[in-house]
Amino acid sequence: MHPIRPWLYVGKFSETQDDVMLRRRGIGAMLQLADSVKQPGIPSLYVPVEDGEPLPQDLLRMGVEFVRLEKALGRNVLIACGAGISRSATFTIAALKEEEALSLLDAFQQVRAKHPEAMPHPALWKSLCEYYGEDVPYAKLLENNRG
């Protein structure tokens, strides 16, 4: 589990099942992208997102609205997918963009600074660019990856 902000974490599916770790990290809500896991006292939203496929705009909006609402309620939010690398990074970038008025590239760089393995799949990145009206070639992410 990678803390991106004091209130925002990126993780993998197995971490959504670890009640002790969730409590230790103060996770108060979960956006789940791989499968639905219920934890007592932790609100969660399961959004079925496939890695490597375009992200439907309604699912992106639903996930980001959930994250922003839970933050507004003072809860630490875990965004989790299978491996904690692509789908969860995609939603984390969108949440940072909206919460902090960052560009997509700046939000990506913020996520990578805390989670060096984070890398949205090209189809997911393209979906973000289309949704937010930003034309940032995927090659820019790869350049950033080389440091």
Image: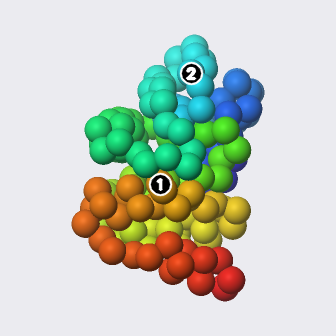
From the viewer's perspective, is 51 left or right of 98?
right
Does residue 50 appear in the picture of this structure?
A: yes
Q: Which residue in the rendered view is the most extreme toward the left?
A: 133
Q: Within 10 angstroms of label 1, few (less than 14), some, or many (20 or more) residues?
A: many
Residue that carries the numbered disc 2 in the rendered image: 36
Q: Which residue is mark 1?
A: 124
Q: Residues within 10 Å of mark 2 (few under 14, many from 20)?
A: some
* x, y percent for residue 9: 57, 48
Rendered residue at 33%/74% (across/down): 135
Q: Residue 74 at what x, y percent from top left? A: 40, 39
User: Disc 1 or 2, which lies upstream in sequence?
Assistant: 2
Q: Is residue 8 above or below residue 65?
A: below
Number of marks drawn: 2
Rendering coords of residue 69 (x, y %): 32, 38
Q: Is residue 41 positioned above or below 34 on the image?
A: above
Q: Amino acid at mark 1?
A: Leu
Residue depicted at x 69% and y 67%: 116
Residue 132 percent coordinates (x, y) = 28, 61
Image-quadrant location for residue 83 = top right
On the question of residue 65 being in view, the answer is no
Q: Toward which corner of the image does residue 136 lie, by quadrant?
A: bottom left
Mark number, residue 55: none
Q: Secondary structure at mark 2?
A: loop
Q: Please state which of residues 111 and 142 is positioned toward the viewer in this rendering.
A: 142
